[in-house]
């Protein structure tokens, strides 16, 4: 990471906090509007830094039908104001998730969004079927990962393919279903409509942008996968622009804003752009306390914005 990323600030985030401003996303009440972003939270790594039950929501790493090893290394490159990753959705698979991470998170009392990954419609369907009767509070369907050779972003950048998949998953579960969208498209509104018309209860955006870094000594890409996904402060204005465009086009759909959030002020920008909630990603990789710090800063900022706070609390969109 470069020095442009906000440095970690020592803070006792374990200390209890009385949340004053909650939100509602697709009928689910969050105690504050801030969640962790998929792939940047791990209970073992983050649980020591803050009480996970105090987050608005914990969104897990993408879960696939069988264990995935992810891409070969190097899988991370620094970039100005952010990072590029090509982790490739490494995870131990849905059965392990159901036996281990989910019960641990639910036992603690966290509100859990399970991020669903797949290489094919069958993969997504298999994971969704297994999660349908689980304790997960919400599902987030990742149709926007740029780091897998098939599935992922290839599904979320074509309206017909997306519509077919979401329509199929909709029939399999009553759980609130969030569809996570890619910024690697020219017309986000068409994609958003396809997801909503097929049965999405909410949208989350943005996932990472396709990018790369080159090692000038070898003249070759730094990452073994060559390209990866860009995230961090550099993508903030892009995420805001995408959220704003979707909100203008679809006034009623709950939106979770993601991209470049590392402070309460930036989270607030997303709420003004039309988001009902936000998720904090790359910032947590340099400062594990970032999601909780952002939540507390936002709680303070909402004190002087009663109209916005009231809309959030009622799950209203603008
Ligand atoms: C290391 C890493 C792993 C990620 N893994 C996932 C994932 O498994 N599923 C997913 O939907 N998004 C994944 N993302 C994307 C983030 O959830 C988020 O959408 C993106 O990084 C933009 O937010 P940020 O700028 O706050 O990081 C990952 C991001 C990073 C940096």
Image (cartoon, helix red, strand yellow):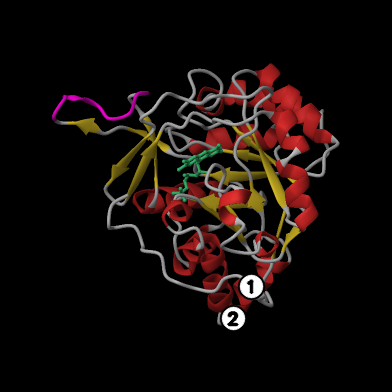
Q: Residue furthest bottom?
A: 304
Mark found first going from the N terminus, 2 or 1? 2
Q: Residue furthest left?
A: 217
**Label 1, on which residue?**
309
Query: Within 10 Å of the Cα at label 1, are there few (<14), some (14-19), or many (20+) other Cα atoms?
Result: many
Q: Nearer the viewer, residue 250 or 121?
A: 121
Residue 137 appears in the figure: no
Residue in the picture at 55% in, 78% down: 300
Q: Secondary structure at mark 2?
A: helix
Residue 245 appears in the figure: yes
5 sits left or right of 252 in the view: left
**Vertical position of residue 212 compared to residue 5: above or below:** above
Q: Secondary structure at mark 1?
A: helix
Determine if the magenta segment contains residue 221: yes
Q: Nearer the viewer, residue 57 or 266?
A: 57
User: Which region is colored magenta?
Assistant: 217-225
Residue in the picture at 46% in, 29% down: 146
**Vertical position of residue 315 compared to residue 159: above or below:** below
Residue in the picture at 56% in, 51% down: 45
Quarter occupied by residue 287: bottom left
Q: Nearer the viewer, residue 145 or 52?
A: 52
Which disc number belongs to residue 280? Answer: none
- Residue 296: percent from left, percent from top: 56, 72
Asked if the residues shown at circle 2 and circle 1 are in contact, with their CB atoms under 8 angstroms apart, the answer is: yes
61 sits left or right of 87 in the view: right
**Vertical position of residue 48 compared to residue 97: above or below:** below
Quarter occupied by residue 72: top left
**Label 2, on which residue?**
303
């Amino acid at each position: 990471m470069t020095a442009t990323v906000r440095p970690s600030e020592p803070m006792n985030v374990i200390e209890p906090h009385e949340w004053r401003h909650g939100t509602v996303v697709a009928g689910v009440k969050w105690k504050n509007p801030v969640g962790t972003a998929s792939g940047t939270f791990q209970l073992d790594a983050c649980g020591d830094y803050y009480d996970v039950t105090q987050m608005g929501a914990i969104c897990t790493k993408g879960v696939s039908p069988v264990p995935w090893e992810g891409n070969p290394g190097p899988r991370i490159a620094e970039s100005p104001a952010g990072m590029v990753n090509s982790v490739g959705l490494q995870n131990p698979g849905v059965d392990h998730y159901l036996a281990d991470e989910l019960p641990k998170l639910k036992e603690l009392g966290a509100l859990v969004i399970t991020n669903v990954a797949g290489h094919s419609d069958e993969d997504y369907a298999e994971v969704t079927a297994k999660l349908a009767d689980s304790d997960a509070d919400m599902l987030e369907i990742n149709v926007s990962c740029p780091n897998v050779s098939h599935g992922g972003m290839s599904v979320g950048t074509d309206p017909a393919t997306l519509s077919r998949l979401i329509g199929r998953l909709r029939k399999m579960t009553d759980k609130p279903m969030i569809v996570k969208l890619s910024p690697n498209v020219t017309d986000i509104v068409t994609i958003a409509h396809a997801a909503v018309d097929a049965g999405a209860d909410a949208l989350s955006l943005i996932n990472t942008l396709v990018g790369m870094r080159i090692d000038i000594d070898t003249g070759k890409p730094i990452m073994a996968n060559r390209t990866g996904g860009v995230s961090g402060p550099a993508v903030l204005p892009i995420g805001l622009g995408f959220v704003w465009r979707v909100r203008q086009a679809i006034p009623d759909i709950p939106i979770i804003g993601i991209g470049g959030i590392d402070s309460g002020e930036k989270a607030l920008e997303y709420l003004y752009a039309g988001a009902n909630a936000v998720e904090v990603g790359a910032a947590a990789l340099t400062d594990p306390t970032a999601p909780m710090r952002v939540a507390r800063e936002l709680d303070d900022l909402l004190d002087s914005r009663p109209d916005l706070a009231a809309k959030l609390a009622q799950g209203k969109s603008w």
